[in-house]
Amino acid sequence: MNFNPKKLFVIVGYPHIGKTKTLQQIFLRRLFFPFKQPIHAPSLGDAPFIVVNNSDTNHRSDDQLARIRSALHFHTETDTSFLIPASLVFDDGIRDIKEILAYLNRSGLDVHYLVLRNSWFDKRIISDGDLLLLEQHVDRGTIHILDRLVTQSKLRFDERVKEIEALMRTVLESRVRYCE
């Protein structure tokens, strides 16, 4: 029995909502290489991370799932946490998130969904219906809703990033499966 499972953080939001920008600000870098050595975020202390990033513009859920599986398998023996962005799409199309959620439910990791409710780029807000669908498809994991309005406000965006970092530190410091 694993009393200290690896942590996996999923930054969730609609496509083009600011997930990659959030990752880049947390880790102070633009590019991520999930099949190399773990990296560190200055704001998260010594915690090693593998970031499995895909751009919103050119990924299919099947391709993203294959990349996630490969990265998790590649780092099975590595003492690290994982962070992935995921587009919240429930349309049964090529970008639908359901298969990714099903895989994460079965992963055995301590999964935390960090939902970016408000967009950085425009005034889109994740609908209550989509949040309900997310809750229905997450059998194992904790959903954290970050609903700070950040549209084109660098100050508010920075505040949201600090809120995410504080939440991640709390989860990382817990020795057992964290639940809100």
Image (cartoon, rainbow, N blue to C red):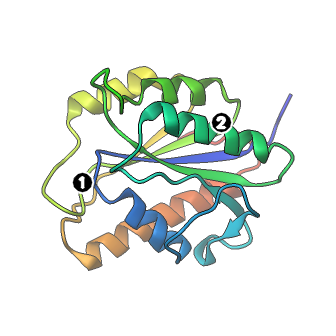
Residue located at (63% from left, 70% from top): 44
Of callouts 2 and 1, the N-terminal one: 2
108 or 63, which is in the foreground?
Answer: 63
Amino acid residing under circle 1:
Asn
Locate residue 146, reporting x and y percent: 35, 53
Q: Residue at x 31, y 70 (%)?
A: 157
Q: Nearer the viewer, residue 166 or 15?
A: 15
Q: Quadrant of residue 123?
A: bottom left
Bin the neighbour count of mark 1 within 10 Å (Cα to Cα): few under 14, some 14-19, many 20 and up. Answer: many
Q: Position of residue 34 (x, y in %)?
A: 65, 56
Lateral position of residue 161 relative to residue 83, left or right = left
- Viewer-proximal residue among 28 and 157: 28
Q: Nearer the viewer, residue 133 or 59?
A: 59
The circle drawn on residue 164 is none
**Residue at the outermost front position:** 58
Label ID, residue 69: 2
Residue 36, image x and y in percent?
74, 61
Image point (46%, 61%), residue name: 164
Residue 99 appears left or right of 121? right
Q: Is residue 32 left or right of residue 160?
A: right
Q: State whether residue 81 appears in this view.
A: yes
Q: Residue farthest to the left?
A: 123
Mark 2 secondary-structure assignment: helix
Q: Quadrant of residue 105?
A: top right
Q: Are marks 2 and 1 in contact (CB under 8 Å)?
A: no
Say if 8 sits above or below 101 in the image.
below
Residue mark closest to the camera, 2 vs 1: 2
Residue at the spot of label 1: 118
Q: Dot 1: what SS?
A: loop
Question: What separation in Å lies between label 2 and label 1 (alpha carbons)?
Answer: 28 Å
Is residue 140 something that shows in the picture?
Answer: no
Quarter holding residue 169? bottom right
